[in-house]
Image (tube, grey):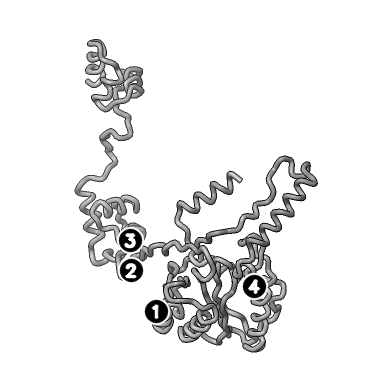
Amino acid sequence: MAIELINEAVSAGARQHKACAVLGVSCRTMRRWQATSDDLEDKRGQANHHRPQALTEDETQAILKVCNTPEFASLPPTQIVPQLADKGIYLASESSFYRILKANNQVNHRGKAQPPRVVPKPLALVAYAPNEVWSWDITYLATEIRGQFLRLYLMIDVFTRMIVGWEIHPEELADHASTLMIKTCMKHHIKPDQLVLHSDNGGPMKGATMLSTLQSLGVVPSFSRPSVSDDNPYSESLFKTLKYTPSYPKKPFASIEQARQWVLGFVTWYNNEHCHSGIKFVTPAQRHRGEDKQILLKRHQVYEQAKRDMPKRWNNRSTRNLQPINEVWLNPPKEHINESINLKQAA
């Protein structure tokens, strides 16, 4: 009928594609129908085909009835179908069970299991200067007693990568974190509403003592999603640097005093000697003091002079990018990530 109607319209002077559009048929489908005039079957994907193997309404209701019996009410289809087979009963496949349950709004956590929480990504934070965004976490330090660990509390400035505060304790307590926060804020002269402190969801981070201290100091707390280490990358990266540095002891710490002595040396080296790759290979202390711009400018002049002296070595290419990093993101939005990827590809 569709072919006859379209041919009649075309004979009357209509354009074929417009006549096809009226019936919701493409010209390509029309040509295929005309080429196979002996087998006029609508093979379009969206067509309402008769499927003899499809479940009947009675079979669908039987599946729903079985799924809602007390025996199977708390089980998923992957458990129901095999148990029915053990009884010599086959109603449908697991996928058919799921499809029918979904159509009847019964696809959920069957039983006492709680559905997974959808935790929104933490707010994107950006630092333009020191002491605007800090990140902190706790890591374990092994001791000579098997199964016993010391806890290293470590705070880092996201903009400068400088370790701004640290302490070692035998246990994880919000009181220890609170004391460290007060000392660190006093050391760096933090004013109310100046700082955002990011951390994970551990007990010391979200303890009442710590949250009360942050409120009294005027520090805004920020938290990662549960079990998502990428939400706190700067602290995680620092812990890897700490534990994989060549000077890290090969044997566990004999005492808490020994651990404190070694961490003091590491922090001194990291802040004042370590040229950090994330801040154009200046030390965190230099960047924290605002000296990085002058250092990078001097390096740029050295590279430009070398290019003038040996132009063939650069082959019309620009020298290394030594522009200071003016902003540092923590949990950046997707648009910023895509923009950074595009810039790297273009470079």
Query: Which numbered disc flags the more N-terminal residue, 3 or 2?
Result: 3
Where is mark 4, residue-wise? 271
Element type at mark 4: helix
Q: Crowding at label 4, few (<14), some or many (≥20) Cα neighbours within 10 Å?
A: many
- Residue at the spot of label 2: 114
Query: Which label's residue is closer to the chain start, 4 or 3?
Result: 3
Foreground mark, 4 or 3?
4
Kindly identify which numbered label has been placed on residue 26. none
Q: Write down the residue under mark 3.
A: 76
The tag earlier along the polypeptide, 2 or 4, is 2
Q: Position of residue 308 (x, y in %)?
A: 76, 46
Closest to the observer, 56 or 337: 337
| Residue nearer the viewer, 93 or 139 | 139
> Which corner quadrant of the image does residue 72 belong to?
bottom left
Label 2 and label 4: CA atoms lie apart by 45 Å
Proximity of marks 2 and 1: CB atoms separated by less than 8 Å: no
Question: Which residue is depicted at the point 58% across and 58% down?
Answer: 325
Q: Earlier in the sequence, mark 4 or mark 1?
A: 1
Residue at 30% x, 64% y: name it. Answer: 110
Disc 1 to disc 3, C-alpha distance: 46 Å
The three-letter code of the residue at mark 1 reads Gln
Residue matched to label 1: 215
Dot 2, crowdedness within 10 Å: few (<14), some or many (≥20)?
few
